[in-house]
Image: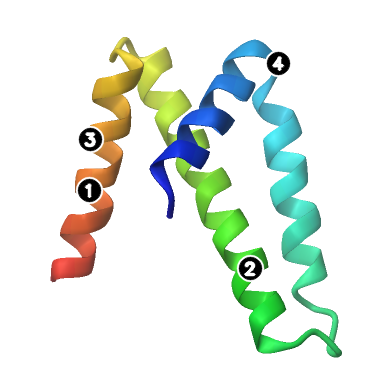
Amino acid sequence: MKLPIIKHLANFIEENDQDYVIEAIETLEALTEVPSLKDEELDVIGELISNMYGAVEVDKMVKEGKPQKEALNTFMSRVLGSIDK
């Protein structure tokens, strides 16, 4: 996950609509079922999906009243905390 990408996507959601990102996630998830995809391609798609889900989570926190910077930091701390376990 890359914080600048999550921030950019969170801004996109704020300016547009979360539905665009949800539909993109669903499209990318459907693409992962293509049997001829190489591992590297699946890794890239997985990274994109992870960043998009991260942006959706950050947007949720912002809508609950957290400032975006704090929401981003909270999300990344949560992700890093789950990796450490």
Question: Which one is in front, 6 or 59?
Answer: 6
Q: Determine the CA span between mark 4 and mark 2.
A: 24 Å
Residue identifier under label 2: 44
Q: Would you say the residues marked 3 and 1 are in contact, meaning their CB atoms lie under 8 Å apart?
A: yes
Helix, strand or loop at disc 1? helix
Relative horizontal placement of residue 80, taking residue 37 as reference (left or right): left
Quadrant of the drawing holding the N terminus: bottom left
Q: Amino acid at mark 2?
A: Val
Instruction: Identify the residue shown where x is 72% and y is 63%.
Output: 29
Q: Earlier in the sequence, mark 1 or mark 4?
A: 4
Helix, strand or loop at disc 2? helix
Q: Would you say the residues marked 3 and 2 are in contact, meaning their CB atoms lie under 8 Å apart?
A: no
Residue identifier under label 1: 78
Helix, strand or loop at disc 3? helix
Instruction: Identify the residue shown where x is 52% and y is 27%.
Output: 10
Quarter residue 23 falls in: top right
Quadrant of the drawing holding the C terminus: bottom left
Residue identifier under label 3: 74
Q: Amino acid at mark 1?
A: Arg
